[in-house]
Image (spheres, coloured by chain):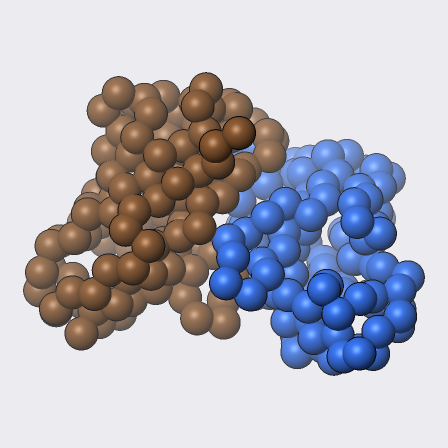
Chain colours: A brown, B blue
Amino acid sequence: GAGVSQTPSNKVTEKGKYVELRCDPISGHTALYWYRQSLGQGPEFLIYFQGTGAADDSGLPNDRFFAVRPEGSVSTLKIQRTERGDSAVYLCASSLGRGTDTQYFGPGTRLTVL
Amino acid sequence: GNSVTQMEGPVTLSEEAFLTINCTYTATGYPSLFWYVQYPGEGLQLLLKATKADDKGSNKGFEATYRKETTSFHLEKGSVQVSDSAVYFCALLANNNDMRFGAGTRLTVKP
């Protein structure tokens, strides 16, 4: 069946610009997660949605980062006034529900801020 | 806070060699433990998992046992293949739904 999909696969932008990254979770998965993976590192947690609400946004690095999931399915990660340090691969994952369910990852969006 | 420490790479082995990648964790409560694999040019894939102490996860010839007494979840494979070349991530998931990953270990298997 269809896995988690993310668009775009690559995004190049200039410092100071606004970007949106999209995630389509596996159908029926109520939990959705965003992670950021810098080169040579493991993914770092950003935010977790259960349904439409952000249940835990403690990983967002600052207020330039924001994510929404208005209908409990697709999610958009929004980054304002991008900085070169935001360059990374942004990963989305989904799972059936809260707790210790297995998370299934998308291929990621590689963001490059020039 | 919760964290995972895994063996630094890169690891280079010959085909059919024995593989161990060490992983230890720090966590409150009773986390689930995972190994994810990232093949070149692909996304993270779940390799195996264990949800409670003494559970053994296994898949594709890889195994890892959840050892609460040593807070470890070491990944092993008896005979690696060239196709196992990838980056391996140990991870833990606690009740707060925050998955913590290790830094990853790059494995290269040479024919």
Q: Which residue shows up at 49% across the image and 72% down it?
A: A40
Closer to the camera, A56 or B45? B45
* Coordinates of residue B70 in the picture (x, y in percent): 82, 54
Residue B6's quadrant in the figure?
bottom right
Residue under the point 25% across and 47% down: A21
Inspect this view and state whether residue A47 appears: no
Residue at 63% across / 56% down in the picture? B37
A17 vs A111, left or right, is left
Q: Which of A97 and A108 is in front in this view?
A: A108
The image shows residue A59 at horizontal and vertical percentages of: 36, 48
How many dots with numbers? 0
Residue A1, position as x, y percentages in the image: 53, 29
Q: Is residue A8 above or below residue B77?
A: above
Q: In the rendered image, which quarter contains the C terminus of chain B?
A: bottom right
Relative height, residue A40 to residue B53 (above, below)? below
Seen at 53% across and 39% down, the residue is A104
Residue B93 % position (x, y)? 59, 40
Return the residue nearer the eye: B100 or A37. Answer: A37
> Which quadrant holds residue B90?
bottom right
Q: Please tell me whether residue B99 is drawn above or below residue B38 in the rendered image.
A: above
Pick whichever, B32 or A22, lies toward us: A22
Q: Can residue A83 be seen from the camera position used here?
A: yes
